[in-house]
Amino acid sequence: MQNQTTPNASIKCSVSNCAHHCEQSQHCCLSTIQVGTHEKNPTMCQCTDCESFKMR
Ligand code: SF4
């Protein structure tokens, strides 16, 4: 289990609904994340997803 109070300064994130979000500093608390896409041919940032998201 990750320490929820240790922000990863290399991963900024504003998704406060995620269980891995460090609310105090607006960073992710994971050491690495997986980014993917739900599109066949992604053309803009809205096509990409954080696949490490976990509902709080
Ligand atoms: S797992 Fe993804 S969505 Fe969740 S806090 Fe980390 S970067 Fe943000």
Image (cartoon, rainbow, N blue to C red):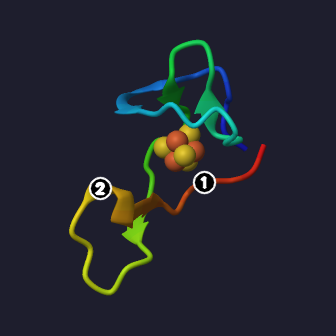
Residue 30 visible in the snapshot: no
Classify 10 Å Cα crowding around label 1: few (below 14), some (14-19), many (20 and above). Answer: some
Give 50 or 9, whichever is nearer the viewer. Answer: 50
Residue 20 visible in the snapshot: yes
Where 49 sits versus 5, above or below? below
Classify 10 Å Cα crowding around label 2: few (below 14), some (14-19), many (20 and above). Answer: few
| Residue drawn at (39%, 69%) of the image | 36
Within 8 Å of ligand 1, the CB of disc 1? Answer: yes
- Residue highlighted by disc 2: 45
**Residue 53: numbered disc:** 1
| Residue drawn at (44%, 76%) of the image | 38
* Amino acid at dot 2: Cys
Q: Nearer the viewer, mark 1 or mark 2?
A: 2
Give 44 or 55, whichever is nearer the viewer. Answer: 44
Quadrant location of the C terminus?
A: top right
Extreme-right residue of the structure: 56
Extreme-left residue of the structure: 43
Q: Tag 2's secondary structure?
A: helix
Query: Tags 1 and 2 in contact by the CB under 8 Å rule?
Result: no
Q: Position of residue 7 (x, y in %)?
A: 51, 24
User: Residue 42: which quarter of the image?
Assistant: bottom left
Q: Is residue 34 left or right of residue 41?
A: right
| Residue drawn at (57%, 22%) of the image | 6
* Amino acid at dot 1: Phe
Q: Position of residue 34 (x, y in %)?
A: 43, 60
